[in-house]
Amino acid sequence: MKKLPPKKAMAPTVSAVGAIRKKQKHLQFSAKSTATEAQYDRLLRLLRTGKRNTIELRRAGIIAPAVRIKELKDWFGYDIPTVERIDMWDDEGFLHPRIAVYELVSEPDGERPQ
């Protein structure tokens, strides 16, 4: 009998993600939650106040900011470009060259952040 290779896991479709988000809208996360939705919430709150870099976002508990930003762009329609690259020292004294700086330009409903 021929053995078939395992099926690859696929990312949820946009409609599936939307349905999941609607069901989870009522959930409340603690300030220290690492749940994906909690990270989206923190990321958007920070970006609504102005430009943010990767190190600032990691300090806020968003361990992979580039991934979360890509998900917000691809799955939910946010316009969050990388507006510049900077060299920055972290709290431990390590130099990180070309750190991304992100800016929230517009949200899916067409609104621009205040």
Image (spheres, rainbow, N blue to C red):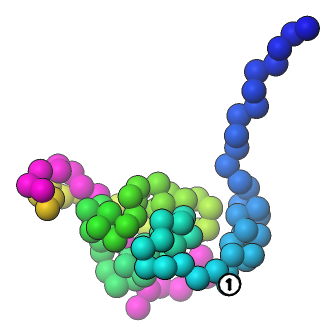
Q: Name the foreground residue: 15 vs 36.
A: 36
Residue drawn where x is 83% and y is 14% of the image = 3
Q: Where's residue 89, x and y in %?
A: 11, 58
* Residue, far top: 1
Question: Which segment is the magenta one?
Answer: 92-114
SS at circle 1? loop
Give the side of residue 114 with respect to residue 16, left or right: left
Name the residue at 53% across, 86% down. Answer: 111
Residue 24 image point, x, y percent = 69, 75
Residue 66 against residue 29 in the figure, above or below: above
For the residue pair 109 and 45, the one nearer the viewer reads as 45
Compared across the picture, whether 75 is left or right of 55 comes to right
| Principal secondary structure, stretch drawn in magenta | loop
Pointer 1 residue: 26
Does residue 67 sit above or below 76 in this rendering? above
Question: For the residue carrying disc 1, how many other residues have a C-alpha within 10 Å: few (<14), some (14-19), or many (20+)?
Answer: few
Rendered-image quadrant of the C terminus: bottom left
* Residue 23 occupies quadrant: bottom right
Residue placed furthest toward the left:
93
Magenta highlight on residue 7: no
Residue 28, position in %: x, y? 58, 82
Q: Amino acid at mark 1?
A: His
Could one spot residue 5 in this view of the protein?
yes
Q: Residue at x 24, y 55 (%)?
A: 99
